[in-house]
Image (cartoon, helix red, strand yellow):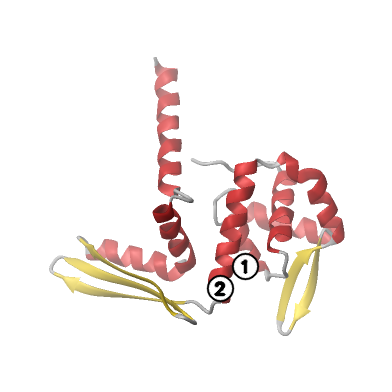
């Protein structure tokens, strides 16, 4: 398992840090996605810390059209300047990059679609993301099981920006989720073996 913030003050600082990095008002659903997308914070802890930040005035709410959006206040910025040094540098950089990619994805009017075509016992799965400029992501997979193809389709339909970001990160070598997870699992196994011997 990877790194997780457990201390509530660290989680609050992390939320404020990300709000200062994106530097624009966002709705609570988008902020939730930004904060939890790399699994440094779970959803329950995010909501708990977020509402405390609102109550303390570190985060302010405003109405834009029909939407309620949130941004960091001057009080929140001052807190980040004092406390962000306590956050791990690599965590901050990765989370800030992830936040900007997610916002960029949503700003371009990206739309996702997927389609399954039966192929014997398996299936062909087409995953497509288009935006204002045309095709952004076009991938066809031949899956040996129709059930597995349905599971992948469901995950893509629910989280197209995360799938896009993960594929882009793995291919560019910028963020290698699979490698990070594998190394964490290997460390856990090695620790368990060391305790047994």
Residue under the point 67% across and 67% down: 28
The residue singled out by tag 1 in the image is 30
The residue singled out by tag 2 in the image is 106
Q: Quadrant of residue 139?
A: bottom left
- Crowding at mark 1 (Cα within 10 Å: few <14, some 14-19, many 20+): some
Q: Quadrant of residue 68?
A: bottom right
Number of marks present in the image shown: 2
Residue under the point 40% across and 67% down: 156
Nearer to us: label 1 or label 2: 2
Of helix, strand and loop, which one carries label 2?
helix
Image coordinates of residue 62 in percent, x first then y, are 79, 74
Of helix, strand and loop, which one carries label 1?
helix
Horizontal arrangement in the rendering, residue 191 relative to residue 119 (left or right): right
Residue 117's disc number = none
Which badge, 1 or 2, is on the more N-terminal residue? 1
Residue under the point 62% across and 67% down: 30
Horizontal arrangement in the rendering, residue 41 relative to residue 136 (left or right): right
Q: Is residue 74 above or below residue 129?
A: above
Foreground residue among 89 and 2: 89
Horizontal arrangement in the rendering, residue 91 relative to residue 186 (left or right): right
Q: Quadrant of the C terminus?
A: top left
Image coordinates of residue 110 in percent, x first then y, are 49, 77
Using the rendered image of the protein, determine whether residue 66 is visible from the camera's viewpoint.
yes
Is label 1 in contact with label 2 (beta carbons under 8 Å)?
Answer: yes
């Amino acid at each position: 398992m990877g790194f997780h913030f457990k201390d509530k003050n660290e989680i609050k600082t992390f939320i404020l840090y990300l709000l200062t990095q994106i530097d624009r008002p966002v709705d609570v659903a988008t902020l939730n996605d930004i904060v939890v997308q790399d699994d440094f914070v779970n959803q329950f802890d995010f909501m708990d810390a977020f509402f405390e930040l609102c109550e303390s005035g570190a985060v302010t709410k405003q109405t834009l059209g029909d939407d309620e959006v949130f941004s960091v206040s001057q009080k929140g910025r001052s807190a980040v300047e004092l406390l962000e040094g306590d956050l791990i540098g690599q965590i901050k950089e990765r989370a800030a990059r992830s936040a900007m990619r997610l916002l960029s994805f949503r700003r371009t009017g990206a739309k996702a679609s997927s389609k399954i075509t039966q192929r014997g016992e398996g299936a062909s799965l087409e995953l497509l993301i288009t935006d204002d400029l045309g095709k952004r992501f076009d991938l066809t997979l031949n899956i040996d099981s129709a059930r597995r193809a349905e599971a992948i389709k469901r995950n893509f339909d629910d989280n197209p920006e995360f799938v896009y970001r993960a594929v882009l990160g793995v291919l560019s070598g910028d963020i290698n989720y699979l490698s990070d997870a594998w190394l964490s699992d290997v460390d856990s196994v090695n620790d368990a073996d060391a305790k047994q011997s």
